[in-house]
Image (cartoon, helix red, strand yellow):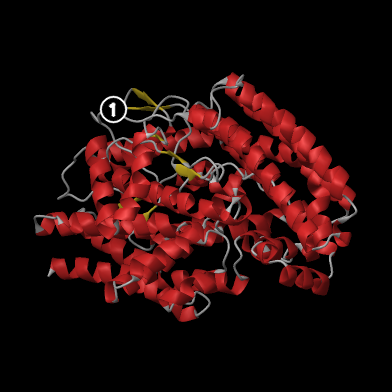
Amino acid sequence: MTHRPTPVFDANASSGAGDLGKLPEWDLSDLYTGEDAPELKRDLDWLQAACADFAGDYEGKLADLDAGGLLECIKRNEAISTTAGRIMSFAGLRYYQLTTDGGRTKFLSDTQEKITNYTTPLVFFTLELNRLEDDHLSTLLKQNAELARYRPVLDRIRAMKPYQLSDELEKLLHDLGVVGDAWERLFDETIAGLSFDVDGEPLGIEGTLNLLTEQDRSKREAASRELARVFGENIRTFARVHNTTAKEKEVLDRWRGMPTAQTGRHLSNDVEAEVVEALRDAVVAAYPKLSHRYYELKRKWLGLDVMQVWDRNAPLPMEETKTVGWDAARSTVMEAYTAFDPRMGDLAKPFFDRGWIDAGVKPGKAPGAFAHPTVTDVHPYVMLNYLGKPRDVMTLAHELGHGVHQVLAAGQGELLSSTPLTLAETASVFGEMLTFRKMLEEADTNAERKVLLAGKVEDMINTVVRQIAFYDFECKLHAARRQGELTPDDINALWMSVQAQSLGPAFEFMDGYETFWAYIPHFVHSPFYVYAYAFGDGLVNALYAVYEENPDGFQDKYFDMLKAGGSKHHKALLAPFGLDASDPKFWDKGLSMISGMIDELEAMEG
């Protein structure tokens, strides 16, 4: 029950180039007007006093509260979370706009330390909540309907009960959090500061990764080899970051008695381990009929005997190299959203009109893309690195889906709005699907349809197959780290063990590709996050199948699901659609949609 974490960068963010029109920038003044804004000082002062007062009023007394008293206590905690979240959102978003700026880095770090110090006295709250007897808490919840609304929050807190340490140790770990964050910042700043030279052109990581989707194969190869060279030069730093963060996690998990390295993520996602393993097993079993089969098709299209890693995201030979200007991207996504339901278009519009999107690629800006919910009494902010590739339109559709979801869920309030990661990808992937279907409908020729279908299949493979391979890599990495320090070569070997398995026999791997684990931010910022992408894609494919079979009344049920935020378990959210993610066959539904699109592509070859 503290401020929300910094945003996690999305997996499939990509980029292109050209004359894009006027790209929007964030207006962060809805949070604060600047570092020296009097409102910011006021809120920091209030937060310091509110945390001290909260501890003075409630520490050691939670067991004595009646239903009304516990409700008041939770609401006060929620107000603290909101203010802390607002302050940290402002500091974090300014930092991501220019990660190489020393002043912004210092401001983020100093603010983080202040808030950690102020909120340390609140550590008792979750500890004492977890000491309440089940019967006592159930009685209180029955006595007060407004209090009962917070049951999902209390259930999630109490799920941590078996892994809770003493009050003193929990306070120590809370204080030490800023030290762990420093490793994340070292990673971010190292990545943002990398410089590449491709054919004499100086580039940052975004521009270099973007070249992997160029039509010119020699350009893709040059970019891949330059990525490998620079990652290789910095591999000791990345290995040190991974060793340290994985060891820190292992120590915490051991002290808490977590049975596996993944347990903490499953708990925070409000998902059962067996559901995640069913997803993982279904995807791995489907590698041959998904990625292996698709990349064999692509190998033929490209006229190659064998594909290299720089061909994985190559455009197809019949694909025209085109740049999509910002206005065209906006209208494509807005039309797709509005056609599904005008309410969806209305919710998306302010993002474009009010400075809620930062789209341009700029030196020092963090790479990738995300939608950050900030706090429920402000609004989300979307970050892109938009360079005009058709897939950038999909990234816009994706992040805008997150934004719409976050706006709808805000009605639940600060503690109930935050959706578990497994469901947090629902609206984003659904928004992509709507945009893709619209573009497919408008395709003039068979070749254009083929290019769109292949692009969607590749995005789904990147979202499902690639992310599950990432998940397997992380599982192996954390298991290996428990046995001792890992050299860069050790980590490289783990990476390669999952790459060949997931991509299939169509590929050869260049020297240096073994270091490409180094730039994936999820491994550092949020271990085991990545399966949420595959979960979200499978869930949306199943949802979209329901929509196609029976569109009547679907929109209202869909909006209800998004509005629920984190107030319901995935079983309850999916029940109105006749879906159940704990059914092992559920995942086959989603995977068969991808397989069906590959069938269609194969049929076009006939």
Vertical relation: 470 (above or below) 226: below
Q: Residue at x 30, y 67 (%)?
A: 293
Please provide percent x and percent y for residue 588.
41, 76
Question: Is residue 332 among what the camera can see?
Answer: yes
In the image, 375: left or right of 197? right
Q: Residue at x 19, y 58 (%)?
A: 440
Please provide percent x and percent y for residue 396.
35, 45
Q: Quadrant of the C terminus?
A: bottom left
Quadrant of residue 208 within the rendered picture: top left
Question: Is residue 305 among what the camera can see?
Answer: no
Quadrant of residue 601 within the rendered picture: bottom left
Judging by the rendered image, the residue that carries numbered circle 1 is: 22
Q: Nearer the viewer, residue 504 or 73?
A: 73
Vertical relation: 558 (above or below) 513: below
Q: Residue at x 57, y 43 (%)?
A: 375
Vertical relation: 1 (above or below) 202: below
Q: Nearer the viewer, residue 165 or 276?
A: 165
Please provide percent x and percent y for residue 86.
60, 37
Q: Amino acid at mark 1?
A: Lys
Q: Nearer the viewer, residue 217 or 79?
A: 79
